[in-house]
Image: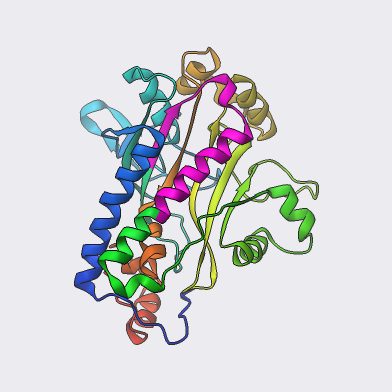
Amino acid sequence: MSKTVVPQDYKSLLGLYDTQKAIGLIKTVFQEKLSLALHLNRVTAPLFVPQGSGLNDDLNGVERPVQFDVPCLDDHAEVVHSLAKWKRFALYKYGYRPGQGLVTDMNAIRRDEELDNLHSIYVDQWDWERVITKENRTLEFLQETVRDIVDAVCATSDELRWKFPALKVIRLNRDVTFFTSQELEDLYPNKTPKERENIITRAHGTVCIMQIGGKLKSGEKHDGRAPDYDDWTLNCDILFWHKTLECALELSSMGIRVDADAMRRQLAEAGCPERAQLPFHKLLLDGTLPLTMGGGIGQSRLCMLLLGKAHIGEVQVSLWDDATTEICRKNQIELL
């Protein structure tokens, strides 16, 4: 059964041809603005990594990577879920200094994703990472970076609305409101995390929810996070209110990455201290890898937001079940 939601009286603001032009403009303009704001330069990134290297992102800890054998290497590889850990190793390998960073196009397959308006098995995002100092490991620095990203999003929207007048009805809030996940639970103890996100984002337009991954006072987590990349006390999600779907749209998951102490603590809390023996983890624990912060910014989700699209399949090519395809066809939602 399809989980696709059809907004009442939905009609795309742009036709297929202009949609493709607009997607190209978004991807060019936003990457330029993000790179200037955060001092990033573009690098080439892998589609797959060696199995067992510890470089892949375990996401919430339950998603299965796509794996395949490589006969010429007598080894196995797996398609990346994201580049969270690879980027940190790349900053070390390429000799980046504090204040410098990288950005890349990340393409991934998430085979266990549940399909709906916002989720696809194909993931495309800007993955960025930059070297920081010990003094930068603060919530204040995290919030400053979030504001820079939101400014880049809004500036891209301004250019897009000038180029395509039909998009002038799309208006984003440049002012970010910050909450911790515990503050949200305290405000709405009887709501689910997703319900809290919708309530607070509807009220404020643009919201940053911080400190995700650890258990709240209730004993529950706001959301799952792998224990070996974000510091759960210094990470966040950036949410925008998506007027077309009447819901909060998570555009970015990001954070200041674990140092050695945070990794040991979070591996123990997650019940997987044995990961400390993986190659990537050893490099982090012995101080070889630099202190960093970084995140992913969904390319298709940004296009959905700035174009007012109702379904992610309107801005990317993926696979959909028959029920979703039929619902979209009947309701003028043109899947690519």
Q: Is residue 35 left or right of residue 112?
A: left
Q: In the rendered structure, does residue 133 fall within the stretch colored magenta?
A: yes
Residue 58 in percent (x, y) is at 50, 40
Residue 111 in percent (x, y) is at 41, 54
Q: Quadrant location of residue 321? A: bottom left
Which residue sits at x=27%, y=60%? 23
Which residue sits at x=61%, y=65%? 198
Which residue sits at x=64%, y=42%? 213
In this rendering, does residue 55 appear at all? no
Which residue sits at x=26%, y=50%? 28
Residue 108 in percent (x, y) is at 35, 47
Q: How is the image coloured?
A: rainbow
Q: Is residue 185 above or below residue 19?
A: above
- Quadrant location of the C terminus? bottom left
Q: Nearer the viewer, residue 169 or 67?
A: 169
Q: Which residues are magenta?
A: 127-154
- Please name the predominant secondary structure of the magenta segment in the image: helix
Q: Is residue 221 left or right of residue 325?
A: right
Residue 124 in percent (x, y) is at 34, 51
Q: In the rendered structure, does residue 329 fall within the stretch colored magenta?
A: no
In this rendering, does residue 87 appear at all? yes
Give the number of marks.
Answer: 0
Q: Is residue 138 left or right of residue 24?
A: right
Q: Is residue 64 above or below residue 275?
A: below
